[in-house]
Image (tube, rainbow, N blue to C red):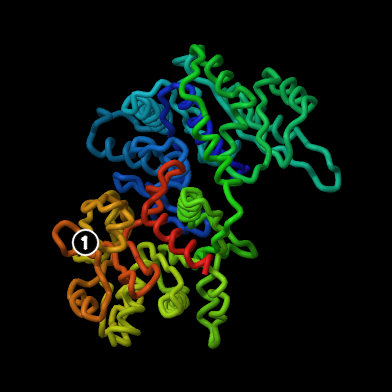
Amino acid sequence: MSGVGKGIAASSIGTLLGAKGYKVNLVKVDPYLNVDAGTMNPTEHGEVFVLNSGLETDQDMGNYERFLGRDLSSDDYITSGMVYKHVIEKERALEYGGKCVEAIPHIRDEIVRRYEHAAKVNNSEISIVEIGGTVGDYQNVMFIEAARLLKMRHPDDVIFMMVSYLPIPSKLGEMKTRPTQHAVHQLASYGVNTDIIIARAERPLDIRRKEKIANACNILPDHVVSAPDIDSIYDVPSNFDRDQLGNIISNALKLSNRKGTGLLGWNKFAAGIKNHTKEKVRIAIVGKYFNTGDFILTDAYLSVLEAVKFSGYAERVRPTIKAVNARDFETKNPAYKVLDNFDGIIIPGGFGGAGIEGKLNVIRYARERGIPCFGLCYGMQLMTIEYARNVAGLEEANTTEINPKTPHPVIDIMGDQKKKLADGHYGGSMRLGLYPAILSKGSVAYGAYKDKTIIKERHRHRYEVNPEYVAQLEKAGLVFSGKSPDGRLCEIVELPRNKHPFFLGAQFHPEFLARPLSPHPLFTAFIKAAKRRSKN
């Protein structure tokens, strides 16, 4: 079933094999027809993660980067939309020499080419390909067929692993294996024989269930790897290691077993992030993408949540993070006092007008009450708008994204974006990917980055601080401490330390570069400020 943890399983296998000394790459396959993830609703699909190249991808790519501890490239992400678009463009350019272009072989072969190309450009010894969706999905059959063809061409070099959920119905109290058996049999009907099963469940599998699955699915009992629910996803690699999964994979691929550097550093981090301290800081994420029907989903801010955890671990505090709906602060009498219970407030990114006035109200309260406040992308723009309205005297200041006729467009669409929108060119057309910025010496940002003058961060936005208002806002006390090399684009805004404990917004998304063993400096600076408040 979806959401069962394929991405974490793939990430953890990459971590495990990397620790054994193999050079590994990870590839995510999303079978939808979107060319990339950028146009999809975050409350339905989760976070859009941006690579250095600017490619907008599924949130699993963020997990891959965090678990591997390195940047990934556009070659490591595949969608059906990419594949079909490429094949159709080749057909239009007569590159098939007049042949009838069909799903098989042409779509299938393009998928195979992409699988092989990703491994080649990464110079990897083991390539891990995660095929999204569930067994039986019509849209991912072609990717499974491509994998089958790879196995046929390279019988000793390809194995198949399936992540399957074993339910424990509450009224029965017994773990049921039949859904997993059916899934394995359905894969077999595609010509794919499962070699290893990652058995997800509320509790660890016992020997009896492993043997039952092994007998029904024609695999060895030790090839059924238990993956029970755990408190931290960062424990998964060590759990897999206890079941000897690394050795099982290398044996199945007929590779020599290696010791490598081992998981000592990773295990220390995983244990520390859960148990390192009793000291807590209370962090509010004031967002607008939490509601999905009757449920609360935090996946839209996944990288933000993880970045907070990494910096908390680095500063020896345990963040307790609460999702706060921005719409709750748009009522006649918002319950602002609730915000006093937090040591820090994060205003994450987003698009559109829903919940924005609530965010602005929260920002004002945090600024006036001295609560550490950290704005990300749209959050930075809203911090600028709030300051313009309530300090600089521009009462009707706004972003043209919400009010195109505002008399004070302190946030306006970037010049190169206007024609793109006029032409209806939305997908993949924002300011995307890694860009440099110059920091002002002596600023909060400069200190956070350990006195670096030039930084590089990942962006995803169409709007910017309007350069025409910068001088007026600076005169009112707002500091633009990070700018593009040409000085035109404002990348970081802040208030000086003597004016506020921590009031800083970044036009980029620092959360995309936060890693378990190398936390992001801006998140760490924010956590430090929250830690100081918690002690007062």
**Which amino acid, by three-letter code, is at mark 1?**
Ser
Residue sitting at 22 percent across and 72 percent down?
Answer: 466
- Residue under pointer 1: 440
Task: Single out the residue that lies furthest toward the right.
Answer: 172
**Residue 302 seen anywhere in this rendered image of the structure:** no
Compare residues 233 and 50 and report the one nearer the observer: 233
Compare residues 527 and 406 and report the one nearer the observer: 527
Residue sitting at 61 percent across and 34 percent down?
Answer: 163
Q: Is residue 377 left or right of residue 223?
A: left
Task: Single out the residue that lies furthest toward the front.
Answer: 536
Indicate the secondary structure of the residue bearing disc 1. loop
Coordinates of residue 57 in the picture (x, y in percent):
40, 47
Against 220, residue 412 (above or below) is: below
Coordinates of residue 445 in the picture (x, y in percent):
30, 60
Coordinates of residue 41 in the picture (x, y in percent):
47, 59
Compare residues 509 and 290 and report the one nearer the observer: 509
Compare residues 271 and 422 and report the one nearer the observer: 271
Against 351, residue 102 (above or below) is: above
Task: Single out the residue that lies furthest toward the left.
Answer: 486
Against 244, residue 328 (above or below) is: below
Residue sitting at 55 percent across and 22 percent down?
Answer: 246
Q: Quadrant of the N terminus?
A: top right
10 Å crowding of disc 1: few (<14), some (14-19), many (20+): many
State which quadrant residue 215 falls in. top right
Report how many numbered discs are placed on residues in the image: 1
Q: Is residue 182 left or right of residue 509?
A: right
Residue sitting at 61 percent across and 64 percent down?
Answer: 293
Coordinates of residue 242 in the picture (x, y in percent):
63, 26
State which quadrant residue 249 falls in. top right
Q: Is residue 473 left or right of residue 170?
A: left
Q: Is residue 254 left or right of residue 457?
A: right
**Residue 289 seen anywhere in this rendered image of the structure:** yes
